[in-house]
Image: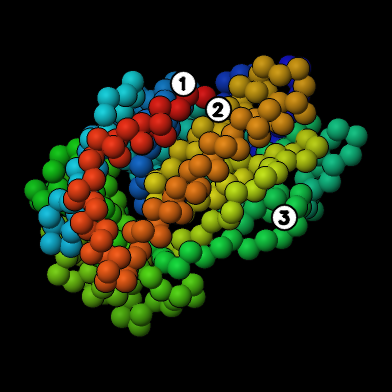
Amino acid sequence: MGAESIGIVGGGIGGIATAVALHQVGINAVVYEKAAGLHEVGAGMMLWPNATRVLREMGLLEKVLACSGPNTHFLVRATCGKVLMNIALGKFDVPAVCMRRSDLLAVLLMALPRERVCLGYDLKCLKQSRGKVRLFFSDGLVAEHDAVVGADGIRSRVRSELFGDSDPIYRGYTVWRGLARYDGNAVPPGSNSETWGVGKRFGILNTGHERFTWYATANVPSRHLDASCGRKRELQNMFAGWHEPVADLIDATANDGILKNGARDFAPLRRWGDGMVTLLGDAAHPCTPNLGQGGCMALEDALVLAKCVDREASLHSALRRYESLRFHRTKGIQQRSLLMGHIGQWQNPLLVTGRRVVTRLLSPKLIERNLRRVYSYKT
Ligand SMILES: Cc1cc2nc3c(=O)[nH]c(=O)nc-3n(C[C@H](O)[C@H](O)[C@H](O)COP(=O)(O)OP(=O)(O)OC[C@H]3O[C@@H](n4cnc5c(N)ncnc54)[C@H](O)[C@@H]3O)c2cc1C
């Protein structure tokens, strides 16, 4: 393809990964991020083999491995700590890891010339005419590109410009997250875990070097206000009596380091693009966090889009090909995540007991085989 330029709105994991992937196939891509600095917040995240495979293809896997924790098993636990299910992740060509989001963003940024990221650019609207896309930002700045990728997250401005405003759907529970140091021995090496209570869950993920990222979920109304005692005390009360090291991890996290997000998504959107504009990452297919796959999907999107741009005869056909290649994959993840969240948040005593019995009877091999399809994806 010729010397086309692509504008990317949003400098999160999806937008920056897309700029890297496009840069690697020789496309001039520029990221416009509304924040004044690139600081990926949000504690740590899982990168499953489908995502580390993307990072390997981008030549970034070694750097990722240097600042992450390995993950070979996933435990489902009862609140007393009893292991209800131990799922081995199986053998893949690349590992599953957990890392701090800020570290992942830093690794991606190392692969991108600095001038490709414009900070403080808050998109207000866009217009398409004669095969070009004009981006209008809040301070009167205007940019023009041959194509635009909306990687501006779940409340995407680009998506609103294409298809009108719509609010993400709150799924009935909220997620708190934090990062903490822990050097005790209550977490088996290489194992991450999720503990199931009644309408509550607690996840522990090892980001390496005695650092952990944890998450806690609870069924609360969408506008749940922080308790007057603060988030930390509220969580300490909510998860009091749970197995080790739940309390230690909450204790080791600063109150103002605890993030809180409602679990939100959209029903899968059938259209992601129009003309010379497309969507990517959470802007296209936001999902609840239950499979830890939202960011992994954004990485897959980035590489698939760059390959389409590289191989297709025109930018227009590249965008439509990318959308058709990604729709079913991301739809499946959105739906499975939603289902996992419903089951995980059950609080009806009968359902909770049934879940516990079934979890203990289910063969981990069955779950492993099922997940293999998700993790084996190749772009
Ligand atoms: C609790 C929780 C846990 C999760 N755990 C995992 C996990 O373990 N593994 C995993 O893979 N995923 C996980 N996810 C999902 C993951 O966080 C998202 O899928 C991922 O961050 C999406 O990246 P993105 O770049 O598409 O969007 P975002 O990260 O939302 O980035 C969008 C960017 O666009 C910018 N922007 C917005 N509007 C504008 C505008 N008008 N103009 C310019 N810029 C704009 C924003 O400032 C932001 O920088 C989790 C999510 C949650 C909520």
Residue occupying the far left of the picture: 185
In the picture, measured across the screen, residue 42 lies left or right of residue 149, that is left
Q: Position of residue 26 (x, y in %)?
A: 64, 19
Residue 242 can be seen in this image: yes
The three-letter code of the residue at mark 2 reads: Leu
Give the crowd class for mark 2: few <14, some 14-19, many >=20 residues within 10 Å: many
- Which residue has dot 3 on it? 160
Picture disc at residue 57: 1
C-alpha span from label 1 to label 2: 9 Å
C-alpha span from label 3 to label 1: 32 Å
Vertical order, 185 against 22 (above or below): below
In the picture, measured across the screen, residue 316 lies left or right of residue 50, that is right
Vertical order, 188 against 145 (above or below): below
Q: Position of residue 359 (x, y in %)?
A: 23, 51
Q: Where is residue 199 in the image (x, y as percent from the top left)?
A: 32, 68
Give the crowd class for mark 1: few <14, some 14-19, many >=20 residues within 10 Å: few
Considering depth in this image, is 110 or 168 the residue closer to the camera?
168
Q: Position of residue 286 (x, y in %)?
A: 54, 50
Which residue shows up at 29% across the image and 51% down it?
213
- Which residue has dot 2 on it? 303
The three-letter code of the residue at mark 3 reads: Ser
Q: Do the residues labelled 1 and 2 touch (CB within 8 Å)?
A: yes
Numbered disc 1: secondary structure: helix
